[in-house]
Image (cartoon, rainbow, N blue to C red):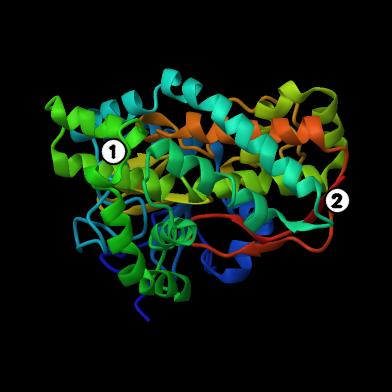
Amino acid sequence: MTLIEGHRPIEPPQGVSVWDIDPYDAAILTDPTDYYQELRARGPLVYIPKYQFLCCGRYAEIKTIFNDWERFVSSRGVGLQDFKLDKPWRPPSIILEVDPPDHTKTRTVMARAMSPRAVKQLKDYFQRTADNLIDQLLLEDSFDAVADLAEAFPTTVFPEAVGLREVNRQHLINYGAMVFNALGPDNALRQRSLAMGPDIVPWITEQCSRENLKPDGLGATIYASADNGDITEDEAGMLVRSLLSAGVDTTVTGIGNALWALASHPEEFEKLKADPSLARPAFEESLRYTSPIHTFCRTANQDTSISGAEIKEGTKLICSLGAANLDEDHWPNADHFDINRRPTGHLALGTGIHGCVGQNIARAEAEAILTAIALKVDKIQARGDAIWRPNNSIHGLDRFPLSFT
């Protein structure tokens, strides 16, 4: 098995702890808590011999890496593959896998399409749809928090917001899983995901074309930037593709994880019921506490150093956002879920110039769902164990039987 394609192996820098572990082992991906703790305890950087890369799990170092796009670039891939050494499985994202000045151009277009004003216009629609969904689920003896809520809601409202004329919910979910699994090594998860490509990718590409988008959605706004000469027609299609790859799976995971956190901490749900305005802070805390995107990578674009460790050009730095968001040196009582925390600065949605461009929409979707639950549901009860779905970059539920009273 080829563990990494397009990877430049490195030797462990002097003074850096060497840890013989596989961060992409399925057991760790489904239950990473002990791994996160040990990763932080071993130092600011850790060398993983299985893949010959550096791994980071502390808040301060990851924030430094993510905020310094000149030394630690995204244009060489935000997964293990170095695009400078090998061709990626699909054309790189022109918003996520690019650096300034090209990134500045596409980021401006995306920020305009998903402006606060655009999100505000969607909020009433999000809330009506959330209210109707929760009303339906209250009639059920039990339901799957993933399929029936966390997946059902975003795959209803987000395609409508983008302006898709045709919606295939399973293709949208599978495409997101494929994109994020592709960021890891060439393990079974990645291979199974990429095997779905011939069925999914052509459909996704077709939906991103101008003629398949409604004239009043986010996609049309992006194409208007092509009409204005800010980007090309092809670039507009690629930006719509980025919406579909990152705008569904991460929101699905974030909402599912928030449901799990509230169900697992009934005292926090009581706080939310008493004050539904805590819906947004509750989502922020669940993002910090569960980190739906557990890992993103950067590549050293020059010889440099972090926390005294010498780093060679071409080194992949595997940044564990999940570990950083539980770093006790930054978050007091980090292992405690507290919706009154106000975790400003968490890394679940990234930071710096590559912070999630669609985060305002994701927050609006989650706030609508949690507000509806706070106003309509008296009790959230687990009807079975939460089963987590291993993914090379996403930490989310596979299924979780619940009931609403």
Q: Which numbered disc covers residue 289?
A: none
Q: Which residue is mark 1?
A: 71
Going by the image, does 193 lie left or right of 256?
Answer: left
- Amino acid type of the residue that numbered disc 2 sits on in the rendered structure: Gln
Query: Could you say where residue 304 lies in the image, as x and y percent from the top left?
Result: 30, 41
Distance from Cα at disc 2 to Cα at disc 1 = 47 Å
User: On the image, which quarter does residue 39 sit in?
Assistant: bottom right
Residue placed most toward the observer, 51 or 400: 400
Query: Could you say where residue 287 lies in the image, as x and y percent from the top left?
Result: 61, 39
Query: Could you say where residue 131 lies in the image, as x and y percent from the top left?
Result: 69, 35
Q: Residue at x 19, y 61 (%)?
A: 85
> Dot 2, how many residues are within 10 Å of its Cα: few (below 14), some (14-19), or many (20+)?
some
Q: Secondary structure at mark 1?
A: loop
Q: Which residue is mark 2?
A: 381
> Which one is in front in this view, the residue at disc 2 or the one at disc 1?
2
Query: In which quadrant of the rendered image does the C terminus lie?
Result: top right
> Dot 1, how many residues are within 10 Å of its Cα: few (below 14), some (14-19), or many (20+)?
some
